[in-house]
Image: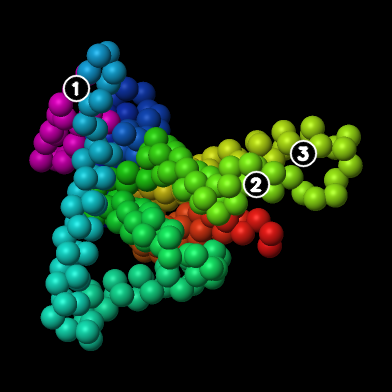
Amino acid sequence: MIWELATTVTEAAKKEGESGGGSGWIMHHVLDSHQLDFSPFGVIDLPHIEVFGIDISITKHIVFMWFAVIVLFIIINYVAKQHKKSLIPTGISNLMEILIVFVRDDIAKATIGKGYEKFLSYLLTVFFFILFCNLTGLIPYGNTPTSNIAVTATLATLSFIVIQAGGMMKNGAFGYFKGLIPHGIPMWLLPIMIVVEFLGLFTKPFALAVRLFANMTAGHVVIFALIGLIFILKTYFVAPVSVSFALFIFLLEILVALIQAYIFTVLSSIFIGMAVHQEH
């Protein structure tokens, strides 16, 4: 990835130098676009599609989201076949089993408690989807779909639906919303608490979406900025420091990819547990 950064940053820096400088090239490589940039080998234009005036074009983030899903499907399918052949996992099957057991025991079971099995499939899907989408940004010429607020907002919306559905299935629609209001509060505080609790339903998924989006975007911006210092300062004396720090952030991003998948999943699980078991 560092070699890719060096080539893309070099070309971008030249263009910015010709146009008077700036840092727009960083966002060009971080934000979504209608092109796949394989500089210096070339650029692939993605199709522009509109249906009834609605833009549903295939973009860079969509391509890598599909790529992450395909890779995940292949790995899960391989692990399932290996599990049928032998009950003793090895290699990647062992790694996947560790992650699955971790999500089951340390996230779903620990935060939801009784009845966690109903939500385990969703939590596993969210965890692995986010993890693989995060990791696609670390491969050469790759990109991170979870650095797109539309992707993280959609994931948060799904969590919101599961949270509300779980709470209503367990407590009933009336009982669920009634349970949101703390017991024993004065009547004059009731109108305020209703508004606060209602807004609280939406601030939880909002926080999920923004946290994942911000963290996955920030890491790539820092890496590009560090490499770009070489060309912005127009000296190669800063290269050893810039490259060293960029490599450190790159390795840290591998850990961040796992941590952010964990945080989104565990918070979703906690919110589900709070909705299902309101008496706790």
Decide if residue 33 is on the left or right side of residue 100.
Answer: left
Q: CA distance from mark 3 to mark 1?
A: 46 Å
Specify the segment rendered in magenta: 33-50
Choose top left, top right, bottom left or bottom right for residue 95.
Answer: bottom left
Asked if residue 174 lies in the magenta stretch, the reply is no
- Residue 28: image x %, image y %? 32, 33
Q: Is residue 20 above or below residue 239?
A: above
Quick check: 58 above or below 246?
above
The nearer-to-camera label among 1 and 2 is 2
Check disc 2: other Cα within 10 Å, few if <14, some if 14-19, many if 20+: some
Q: Amino acid at mark 3?
A: Met
In which image quadrant can residue 204 be found?
Answer: top right
Q: Which residue is mark 3?
A: 193
Q: Which kind of residue does numbered mark 1 sit on?
A: Ile
Element at badge 3?
helix
Q: Is residue 131 left or right of residue 279?
A: left
* Along the viewing direction, whichever of 216 and 187 lies nearer the viewer: 187
- At 73% from the left and 36% from the top, the residue drawn is 194
Q: Which residue is mark 2?
A: 175
Residue 68 in the figure: left or right of residue 158: left
Decide: is 76 above or below 230: below
Q: Residue furthest bottom?
A: 88
Disc nearer the start of the sequence (3/1): 1
Q: Marks 2 and 1: in contact by CB < 8 Å?
A: no
Q: Which residue is mark 1?
A: 49
259 sits to left or right of 33: right
Q: How far apart, in angstroms, are the residues tagged by discs 2 and 3? A: 16 Å
Mark toward the start of the polypeptide (2 vs 3): 2
Q: Secondary structure at mark 2?
A: helix
Q: Nearer the viewer, mark 3 or mark 1?
A: 3
Q: Amino acid at mark 2?
A: Gly
